[in-house]
């Protein structure tokens, strides 16, 4: 029995998708690999390199295109199709950018083609960096299309491949060339960031734990892009520490320190792109609201707490920060982050709506400001209504119902105040 178990101390040999090797003397030819012409891959992989590589800096497009020239490299074919699928799902290219060669839905075709190729090569029995990455990109593609459970399984699959290859263990990196080691590190950190975000939003369990002795991420290969990626990784590491706890009691002091830690993670602005800046800033605000909601289960929050993160009005502050950011960046930049960003914005909007609905007294007088909490909520609602051509209808309906109830509640307040004054006058009458 023991002989059949995977020995984590003796990792599975890595077939590195970034390292091209000569085909075996008797290569297996896959006749279906020409279903996607090279021009289609060049087009969509070029869009990925231009727009999405700063977010997911794990695929070297020039190397992948070279590998596609080998008709036996089905791993490369599956990965290229998966990257193409996610590029279409994230960017929703305009009609002049989409090739429209595959029945009108290039994204669905590319995802299906990647899945077909993976099964043809029996991918579950052949863990490699390329197979791992095709699982990851298919996760993003399917999640963006609303297939949340399928996306979750693909993410779990990618993480399991990483664990089989020992990417989560420091020993894996001991004898790797520097550039290869850094690419593997970026891959495992990308999985860490993605799993933390996905499981937090959908309340799924997490399975990835990183060795605290992993080598440091470095920026030598591409400083402008990698500075921002490292900053985002550190932000998620701080978020994980805040949410998982450090063994100390979850008191006011604990949550104040966790809020300070999240606030203290600074974005590396050194030549980072709008896509990276928007991702960092909006994700940071979402993390702070998630931490605030968690703290409500452990401590009493006050209307005017000294630390804003412990205040009942905190969602208003976060929502204002978010609105400032969505008004700073082009809509296309924010929408390029897909479903994950949409759900983060919904969480902020719902939190503000809930506190306005449940504790309206917290904001008495603030609506008289030039921009009050309801104005902020309206702006978030407007943005989400048009997100990527039409937002999540179910969540939008819930949000709009809450906003309608808030408006109705405010409309009733003058009548309630008048009734209260009349009752006070009656109470003051001398009936003797």
Image (cartoon, rainbow, N blue to C red):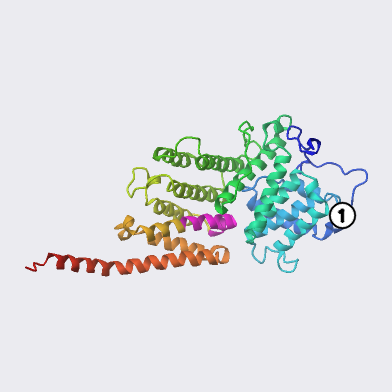
Secondary structure state at the residue bearing disc 1: loop
- Report the predominant secondary structure element of the magenta stretch: helix
Magenta run includes residue 332: yes
Residue 216 against residue 307 in the figure, above or below: above
Pick the front one: 109 or 276: 109
Residue drawn at the location 67% of the way across and 58% of the way down:
142
Residue drawn at the location 33% of the way across and 55% of the way down:
362
Residue 280 against residue 415 in the figure, above or below: above
- In terms of image quadrants, where is residue 371? bottom left
- Left or right of 253: which side holds 62? right
Where's the N terminus, which quadrant? top right
The total number of labels drawn is: 1
Residue stretch rendered in magenta on the structure: 331-349
The residue indicated by pointer 1 is 30
* Residue 62 visible, this angle: no
Rendering coords of residue 376 (x, y %): 41, 59
Residue drawn at the location 71% of the way across and 56% of the way down:
84
Where's the C terminus, which quadrant? bottom left
Rendering coords of residue 156 (x, y %): 67, 48
Rendering coords of residue 416 (x, y %): 26, 67
């Amino acid at each position: 029995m023991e002989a059949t178990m995977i020995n984590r101390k003796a990792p599975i040999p890595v077939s590195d998708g970034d390292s091209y090797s000569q085909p075996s003397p008797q290569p297996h030819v896959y006749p279906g690999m020409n279903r996607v012409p090279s021009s289609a891959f060049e087009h969509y992989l070029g869009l990925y390199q231009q727009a999405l590589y700063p977010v997911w800096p794990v695929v070297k497009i020039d190397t992948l295109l070279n590998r596609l020239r080998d008709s036996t490299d089905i791993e490369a074919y599956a990965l290229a199709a998966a990257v193409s699928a996610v590029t279409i799902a994230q960017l929703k290219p305009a009609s002049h950018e989409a090739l429209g060669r595959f029945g009108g839905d290039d994204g669905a075709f590319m995802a299906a083609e990647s899945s077909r190729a993976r099964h043809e090569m029996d991918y579950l029995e052949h863990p490699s960096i390329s197979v791992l990455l095709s699982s990851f990109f298919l996760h993003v593609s399917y999640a963006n299309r609303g297939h949340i459970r399928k996306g979750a399984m693909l993410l779990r699959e990618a993480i399991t491949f990483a664990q089989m290859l020992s990417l989560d263990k420091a020993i894996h990196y001991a004898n790797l060339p520097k550039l290869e080691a850094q690419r593997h590190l970026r891959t495992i950190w990308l999985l860490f960031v993605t799993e933390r975000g996905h499981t937090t939003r959908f309340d799924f369990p997490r399975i990835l734990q990183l060795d605290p002795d992993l080598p440091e991420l470095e920026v030598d290969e591409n400083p402008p892009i990698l500075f921002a990626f490292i900053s985002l990784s550190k932000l998620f590491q701080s978020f994980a520490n805040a949410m998982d706890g450090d063994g100390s009691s979850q008191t006011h002091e604990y949550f104040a320190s966790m809020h300070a830690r999240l606030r203290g993670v600074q974005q590396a602005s050194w030549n980072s792109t709008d896509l990276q800046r928007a991702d960092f800033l909006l994700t940071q605000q979402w993390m702070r609201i998630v931490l605030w909601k968690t703290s409500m289960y452990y401590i009493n929050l006050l209307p005017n707490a000294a630390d804003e993160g412990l205040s009942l009005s905190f969602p208003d502050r976060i929502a204002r920060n978010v609105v400032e950011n969505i008004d700073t960046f082009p809509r296309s930049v924010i929408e390029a982050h897909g479903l994950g960003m949409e759900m983060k914005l919904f969480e902020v909007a719902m939190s503000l709506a809930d506190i306005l609905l449940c504790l309206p007294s917290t904001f008495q007088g603030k609506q008289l400001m030039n921009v009050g909490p309801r104005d902020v909520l309206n702006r978030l609602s407007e943005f989400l209504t048009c997100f990527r051509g039409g937002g999540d209808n179910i969540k939008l309906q819930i949000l709009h119902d809450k906003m309608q109830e808030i408006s109705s509640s405010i409309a009733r307040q003058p009548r309630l105040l008048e009734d209260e004054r009349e009752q006070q006058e009656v109470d003051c009458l001398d009936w003797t």
